[in-house]
C-alpha cells in the first residue's frame, strides 16, 4: 500500500473520528427515540357508553335452579373483542368465602369458560374438565393431548379445545369438539404444528392461530376448513373479533387485521420497539378491541394502541420489561376508558385508553404474565413470581383483596361468584355480599 503524506494522515484520522461520532449520535438518537412513549392525537377514538350491566348479570339466583340464569362466559376474555371486562349492577366485595375447591397438581395457566350450569377447564396436561359451577363436582374428564396452554370455548351444545401437543413425542397439535353434556368427541382435527391460541367461536365458525403462523377458520359443526391465513411467524395469542374483522399479533412483531368472511388481509402493521428501535418484539399477548382501537402488549416492553380501521399507531407506552400479558379494556363507573395490563417488571398499569398516559401504577414485585380481569369495579391479576393474586380498585389501584395463590390468568365470574385459578386448583368464591342458594 502506498504511504500517505504526514498531513494526509491527520485528515484521514479526523474524518474517521467524525464518522464514529456521527454514528454514535445516530445510535443514541435511535435509542432515545425507541425508549420514549408515543401518542398521536390525530388517531380516531370512538367514545362509547359503558356496557349495560342489568342486561348482563341477574341480581338474584333464579327460582328453578341456582345456576339456571342463562349466563355465559364462553370465551377467553369474556366477549369476542377479548375485553376481559364484566360489568355488574352491584358491587362484589371481599372477603371472599370458599364455596368449593377442585384441587389438583397440574398447572392452571388459563381460566375456564362458563356455559349455563357448568365450567369447562383445560389443564396444562391436555385434560379437559366439566365442573359444576354450583358445587365444584367434576362431571366428566377427557384427556385430549399431552400439553395445552389455552382456554376452551363453549356454545351451541359443544365445547372446543386447542392443544399444544396431541401426544408425547409428537410436534403437532390438535383441535377437538366435544358435546357439553357427556364429553363425547364430535370431531377432531390434527394440526401440523403446535397451537396455544384460545379459540374464538362465532356464528358456527371456530377461529384460532398456530405456531407455524397459520390462522384457521373451521366449520364448528364438523371441523372442516373454511379458509386459512398465513402470518409471517407464530400466532400464539387468541384472535379477537370486532366490526367484521379479526385481529391478532405474531412473533415477527406484526399486528394483522383480516376479514372474517374470507380471511383476506385488511391491513398489517409492524413494530420497532426492540433493539434500540432497530428490531421488532414479539406479540404473545392477545389483543383487545374497543373504542375504534386495538390494544396489545409486546415483548419489547411496550403496550400499543392501533386504529382498528387502518392500523395506524395511536400510542405506545413503555414498561421496563416484557409484556406477555393481555390487556383488559373498558370503563368502570366514575373513571375514563382504561387499559389494565401487567408487565414482567412487576408493575401493574392502568393506562388512559385514548392517550396511553398512566392513570395509576402498582408495583407488586415480580412477574405479571397473565391477563387481568375486570369484574364490576375490581381488577384482578396474578403475579407468577410471587404466586399471588390481587384485586385492586379499578379506578384507584387500591388493594382490596390479596391471596398467596395464583400464577397466570386469575378469574372469571357470573356476577354472583368468583371462579378463581390458584396455581393448580380451581376455587368457587362467594363474595361477602352474595351467596348461592343450595338445594
Image (cartoon, rainbow, N blue to C red):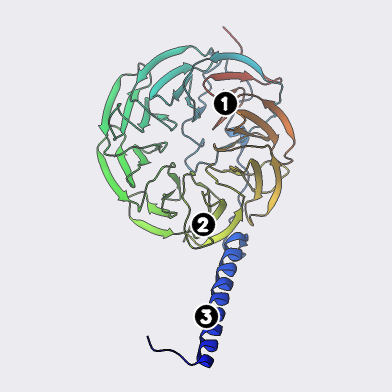
Q: Residue at x 75, y 36 (%)?
A: 398
Identify the image quadrant of the C terminus: top right
Task: Give whichever of discs 3 and 1 has the lower sequence position.
Answer: 3
The answer to whether any part of residue 291 appears in the image is: no
Q: CA distance from mark 3 to mark 2?
A: 29 Å
Q: Is residue 281 above or below residue 116?
A: below
Identify the image quadrant of the N terminus: bottom left
Mark 1, residue position? 414
Task: Give whichever of discs 1 and 2 has the lower sequence position.
Answer: 2
Q: Quadrant of residue 93?
A: top right
Q: Quadrant of residue 94?
A: top right
Q: Residue at x 26, y 33 (%)?
A: 190
Q: x, y percentage for residue 100? A: 57, 13
Give the secondary structure at mark 2: loop
Frontmost of labels 3 and 2 is 3
Q: How many marks?
A: 3
Q: Which mark is residue 274?
A: 2
Amino acid at each position: 500500500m502506498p504511504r500517505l503524506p504526514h498531513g494526509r494522515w491527520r485528515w484521514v484520522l479526523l474524518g474517521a473520528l467524525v464518522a464514529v461520532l456521527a454514528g454514535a449520535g445516530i445510535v443514541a438518537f435511535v435509542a432515545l427515540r425507541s425508549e420514549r412513549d408515543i401518542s398521536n392525537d390525530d388517531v380516531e377514538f370512538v367514545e362509547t357508553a359503558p356496557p349495560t350491566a342489568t342486561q348482563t348479570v341477574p341480581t338474584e339466583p333464579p327460582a328453578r335452579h341456582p345456576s339456571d340464569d342463562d349466563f355465559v362466559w364462553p370465551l377467553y376474555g369474556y366477549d369476542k373483542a377479548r375485553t376481559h371486562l364484566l360489568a355488574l349492577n352491584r358491587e362484589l366485595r371481599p372477603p371472599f368465602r370458599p364455596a368449593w375447591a377442585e384441587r389438583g397438581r397440574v398447572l392452571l395457566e388459563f381460566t375456564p369458560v362458563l356455559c349455563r350450569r357448568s365450567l369447562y377447564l383445560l389443564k396444562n396436561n391436555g385434560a379437559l374438565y366439566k365442573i359444576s359451577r354450583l358445587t365444584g363436582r367434576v362431571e366428566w374428564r377427557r384427556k385430549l393431548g399431552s400439553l395445552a396452554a389455552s382456554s376452551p370455548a363453549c356454545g351451541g351444545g359443544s365445547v372446543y379445545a386447542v392443544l399444544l401437543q396431541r401426544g408425547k413425542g409428537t410436534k403437532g397439535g390438535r383441535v377437538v369438539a366435544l358435546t357439553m353434556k357427556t364429553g363425547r368427541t364430535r370431531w377432531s382435527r390434527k394440526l401440523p404444528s403446535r397451537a396455544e391460541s384460545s379459540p374464538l367461536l362465532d356464528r358456527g365458525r371456530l377461529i384460532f392461530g398456530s405456531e407455524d403462523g397459520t390462522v384457521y377458520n373451521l366449520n364448528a359443526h364438523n371441523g372442516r376448513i373454511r379458509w386459512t391465513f398465513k402470518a409471517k411467524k407464530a400466532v400464539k395469542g387468541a384472535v379477537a373479533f370486532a366490526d367484521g374483522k379479526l385481529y391478532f399479533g405474531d412473533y415477527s412483531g406484526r399486528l394483522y387485521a383480516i376479514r372474517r368472511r374470507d380471511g383476506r388481509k385488511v391491513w398489517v402493521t409492524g413494530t420497532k420497539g426492540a433493539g434500540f428501535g432497530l428490531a421488532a418484539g414479539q406479540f404473545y399477548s392477545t389483543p383487545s378491541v374497543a373504542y375504534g382501537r386495538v390494544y396489545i402488549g409486546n415483548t419489547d416492553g411496550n403496550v400499543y394502541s392501533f386504529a382498528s380501521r387502518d392500523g395506524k399507531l395511536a400510542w405506545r407506552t413503555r414498561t421496563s420489561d416484557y409484556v406477555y400479558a393481555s390487556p383488559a379494556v373498558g370503563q368502570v363507573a366514575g373513571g375514563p376508558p382504561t387499559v389494565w395490563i401487567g408487565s414482567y417488571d412487576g408493575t401493574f398499569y392502568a393506562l388512559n385508553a385514548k392517550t396511553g398516559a398512566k392513570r395509576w401504577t402498582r408495583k407488586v414485585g415480580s412477574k405479571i404474565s397473565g391477563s387481568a380481569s375486570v369484574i364490576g369495579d375490581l381488577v384482578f391479576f396474578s403475579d407468577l413470581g410471587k404466586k399471588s393474586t390481587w384485586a385492586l380498585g379499578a379506578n384507584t389501584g387500591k388493594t382490596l383483596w390479596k391471596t398467596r395463590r395464583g400464577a397466570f390468568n386469575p378469574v372469571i365470574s357470573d356476577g354472583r361468584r368468583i371462579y378463581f385459578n390458584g396455581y393448580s386448583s380451581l376455587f368457587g368464591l362467594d363474595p361477602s355480599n352474595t351467596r348461592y342458594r343450595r338445594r
